[in-house]
């Protein structure tokens, strides 16, 4: 069985570490790739520049508040591309702004999750994400 690829688009080093630790603690076998801004996310997803050999992710965890291009701009480009739009895109952000939530769903985000600040709660949420997206849901086979 192939190891699922997760792309984390996050600029906060603390949140990156938190996600890495939560995934380790879950004992779920996956590969976490991290990019730190919106432009880098698109380079990764479109396999440009230093990312020409990047694996296509099975799941995207996307922060909204990113440098260079916002998470909403990245989401819009993902969902406008026929190849990328099938990849589940989860908004994982600190924003509970109703406009952000509505805009994310209008751009076809698969779900919108507000990041918990407590590590145990974040680890529990990570396990739920993994369990749902990799054990309960049937995802398409992506081209690698």
Image: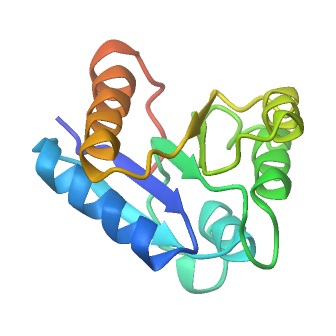
Residue name at image x 33 percent, y 70 percent: 17
Q: In the displayed structure, would residue 6 be above or below residue 26?
A: below
> In this rendering, would 31 be left or right of 47?
left
Q: In the displayed structure, would residue 46 be above or below residue 111?
A: below
- Where the N terminus falls, by quadrant? top left
| Residue that lies at the very extreme toward the bottom in this rendered image | 50
Residue 115 at x, y percent in the picture: 51, 46
Residue 55 at x, y percent in the picture: 44, 60
Q: Nearer the viewer, residue 115 or 19?
A: 115
Q: Nearer the viewer, residue 138 or 128?
A: 128
Q: Quadrant of residue 52?
A: bottom right
> In this rendering, would 81 be left or right of 144?
right
Residue name at image x 28 percent, y 62 percent: 20
> In this rendering, would 64 be left or right of 122?
right
Q: How many marks?
A: 0
Q: Coloured how? A: rainbow
Residue 83 at x, y percent in the picture: 69, 41
Residue 126 at x, y percent in the picture: 33, 40
Q: In the displayed structure, would residue 25 be above or below residue 89?
A: below
Q: Nearer the viewer, residue 75 or 125?
A: 125
Residue name at image x 28 percent, y 56 percent: 31
Residue name at image x 38 percent, y 31 percent: 129
């Amino acid at each position: 069985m192939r190891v699922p690829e997760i792309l984390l688009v996050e600029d906060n080093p603390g949140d990156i570490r938190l996600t890495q630790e939560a995934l380790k603690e879950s004992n779920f076998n996956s590969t976490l790739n991290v990019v730190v801004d919106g432009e880098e996310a698109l380079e990764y997803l479109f396999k440009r520049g230093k990312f020409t050999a990047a694996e296509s992710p099975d799941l995207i965890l996307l922060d909204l508040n990113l440098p260079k291009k916002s998470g909403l701009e990245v989401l819009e480009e993902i969902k406008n591309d026929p190849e990328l739009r099938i990849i589940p895109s989860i908004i994982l952000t600190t924003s509970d702004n109703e406009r952000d939530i509505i805009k994310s769903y209008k751009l076809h985000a698969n779900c919108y999750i507000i990041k918990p600040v407590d590590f145990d709660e974040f680890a529990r949420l990570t396990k739920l994400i993994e369990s749902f997206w990799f054990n309960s849901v049937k995802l398409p086979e992506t081209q690698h």
